[in-house]
Amino acid sequence: MEDSEKQATLFYDSECGLCLRFKQALDRIPGTSQINKISIHEAEAFSNFPELTKQQCEKEVHLVDENGNILVGEEVIEYLISKFPGVEKFAWLLESGMGQKAVEYFNTIAKLTRETLRKRCSTCKN
């Protein structure tokens, strides 16, 4: 695949309601169709990304950008805010200390909520 054809890849947990809603909301933002969205439960999810594991992606959202850089948690949020016109109205979050704290807080709460949901889930393996 040529550099101009490379796409970012977002890894999400299709069995997690919170993650699925995040992916569905992302699908509604213009331009984000250029991101490959792969469920971490697909058999071949990590075949092209041996540096990642399902266990890592279960703990926190991961995205491999079009240059092959691995972004985790807050970095994914920052990438999405800065990259897509539909979320550029939130770009101010990246430009101020308070904004950075808001992004950190959002990521922390999302992570805690996901961990709580996983602990309550009878089919999830910890």
Image: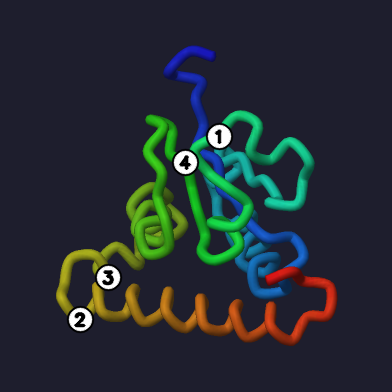
Against 63, is 111 above or below? below
Percent position of residue 60, x then y: 51, 64
Residue 64's disc is 4
Cβ–Cβ under 8 Å for marks 3 and 2: no
Residue on which the image places disc 2 = 98
* Residue 12 placement, left or right of 125: left
Q: Amino acid at mark 1?
A: Pro
Considering the numbered disc 1 on the image, is that residue within a helix, a strand or a loop? loop
Query: Is disc 4 placed on a helix, strand or loop?
Result: strand
Instruction: Kindly state the secondary structure of the residue where label 2 is placed.
Output: helix
CB within 8 Å, label 4 to label 1: no
- The first of marks 4 and 3 along the sequence is 4
Badge number at residue 37: none
**Which labelled disc corresponds to residue 93?**
3
Residue 113, by quadrant, is: bottom right
Residue at the image point whose x is 72% and y is 73% from the top:
17
The disc, 2 or 4, on the residue closer to the chain's N-terminal end is: 4
Q: Residues within 10 Å of mark 3 (few under 14, many from 20)?
A: some
Rounded to the nearest angstrom, the CA distance separating label 3 from label 2 is: 7 Å
The residue that disc 1 covers is 50
Q: Is residue 72 above or below residue 107?
A: above
Left or right: 7, with 12 as reference point: left
Mark 4 and mark 3: Cα distance apart in space: 22 Å
Looking at the rendered structure, the kind of residue marked 2 is Met
Quarter of image, res 24: bottom right
